[in-house]
Image (cartoon, coloured by chain):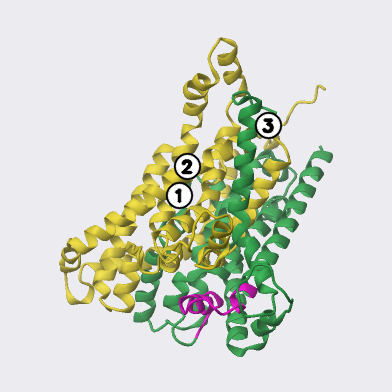
Chain colours: A green, B yellow
Amino acid sequence: MNEYLLGLQGRRVLFAYAIVLILFIILPALVLVPISISADDSFVIIPEAFSLRWYEQLVGDPRWRNALVLSLQVAAVASVMATIAGVLGAIGISRASPKVAKVLRLIFIAPIIVPLMVIGVGFYMLYARMRLVGSFFPLCLAHAVLVLPFVMLPVSARLYSIDKRLEWAAASLGAGPYRTIFRVQLPLLAPSIFAGFVFAFIFSFDEVVVAQFLSGPRLETLPRRMWEGIQMGGLEKTITAVTTAQLLLAVVAMLIISIWQRRSATKAVSSK
Amino acid sequence: MSTTIPNRNTLLAGFSSADWESQRRRVTAVLLILPVVMMTLLFLVPLGYLLWLSFGGPAGFSLNAYKQLSAPFYINLALFTLQLAFLVTIACAVIAYPLAYMLANIENTLSRLVVLGLVISLWLSVLARTYSWIIILQRNGVVNNMLQWMGITDGPLSLVYNQTGVYIGMIHILLPYMVMTLYPTMRAIDGSLVRSALSLGATPWTAFRRIYFPLSMSGLVSGSILVFTMAIGFFVTPAILGGGSANTIVMAIQNQVQVLVDLPLAAATSIILLLVSMLILVVYEKIAGVEKIFGEGR
């Protein structure tokens, strides 16, 4: 306990406040789960009968299934590209001179600072001129740039915590520069690379603003399908199945990352 | 323990340092080729094309699009967007501050639960959370049923498809970012400073006002800049929860492209918004340093 200002009474008030806020923070996640497994069409929080029919519709109904498959493909291609470029960029920036690194950091962070709508319109107009709107690979490329910072941030953070002397030690033992990167740095970065990949995947899988411009009439991604459903009044309960599945995937990925990071942390300590 | 910790010179003994440096620089350049080319072609080029279009593009140089933007309609839209972003930022700062204080200073189950909730919320799709707020806030939703059951209100309140819904949704989505920026700053505050102020006779309020709060200020500023920037560019939440009553600049851009099909106007509006966000990024760099976001010097 490191708290001196509040006193017993004040701390009790703070705890009560935190409980209220936890409810506020997780309420939207909590509400979706029971609705997605209730059998009837209504949106009651406590269902009377359970059924997986909304999940069946997600994989059974061709329009939903196609959207789901397309979004998984786009997210996979985009996040793999972003992971490769992001890891190279993060390692490159960590080795560059301070001035160059400063400029590069500003450029590489920009995709999460500049509004998605601005980036989306920029791509849309360029792609429209090049007749690339509605094609699969250009959409993946656009998403790859959007999610690049999500890979670079965790990888950079990890890079700064790695002992710099490892690189010199590897060099003094005769490892070439690329061998040092592949055999010394990359294994140490692995958990953060995976975390970045997952962040990138989730963001791309959820992205609707840029996708609605670039997907054209033929490519309908899952968020676009959901967006349309919500604009129609949001009465399609398949949307709740999608969001619950996303929630589960996110929680599983989070558990994997935290276990992995804890493991590699204890390994680092025990090998000292 | 008398082992000397190897330093750069002992480790690299036997290498010519000039060779080592030039080879190292070459490798760094090779590493950076792909990401830099990617950012140039897929980020700087589209935005550059937008800039060119906003000044008339193929039709020749013209400031027409920018002149259109000085109409009262767009001025009001810009003012509303700034007001929305400003109020959401203030609300997030006020709500997040005690929460971050607790996470930084008290280690118990409740703190761990708060972190878990924040992370789950952060990872859940924005579209999903926005959709969920419709279900919660609608006329026969959870909140309205609860309020009526407790006898606080007679009929259902309209909480969604208006500005109330937009504020609730945006605060909910941006709150985790504020807490996560405040937390490391508060965590780094030396507790002995507060303790010595108290032992020298300061009241807890004075110690907070004169010692703790000023030390937490940098986190509050960077968190606010981050949340403000994200709030300005927010599209999904105001578009869905606002039901047409909370029109922002980004929604106007979408309208210019898809309904008005006025591409130079959309390009000019985007460029203005781009300039605003780049300006905020530069201010952030001056105040907090972008390398902090990258985890350096933490």
The nearer-to-camera label among 1 and 3 is 1
The chain letter under disc 3 is B
Residue A156 is covered by the magenta coloring: no
Residue A71 lies left or right of residue A259; in this view the side is left
| Secondary structure of the residue carrying numbered label 3 | loop
Amino acid type at circle 2 is Ala
**Residue situated in front as seen by the camera: B233 or A144:** B233
The nearer-to-camera label among 1 and 2 is 2
Crowdedness of circle 3 by 10 Å Cα count: few (<14), some, many (20+)? few
Mark 1 vs mark 3: same chain? yes
Instruction: From the image, give the main secondary structure of the stretch colored magenta.
Output: helix
Identity of the residue drawn at 62% across and 42% down: A18
Q: Which numbered disc flags the more N-terminal residue, 1 or 3?
A: 3
Residue A205 lies left or right of residue B276; in this view the side is right
Distance Cα–Cα, label 3 vs label 2: 44 Å
| Residue A123 horizontal/vertical position (percent) | 40, 72
Identity of the residue drawn at 80% across and 25% down: B3
| Secondary structure of the residue carrying numbered label 1 | helix
Residue topped by disc 1:
B227
Residue B72 lies left or right of residue B294; in this view the side is left
Contact check, label 3 and label 2, Cβ < 8 Å: no
Distance Cα–Cα, label 1 vs label 3: 42 Å
The nearer-to-camera label among 3 and 2 is 2
Residue topped by disc 3:
B7
**Residue situated in front as seen by the camera: B54 or B28:** B54
Residue topped by disc 2:
B93
Residue stretch in magenta: A219-241
Contact check, label 1 and label 2, Cβ < 8 Å: yes
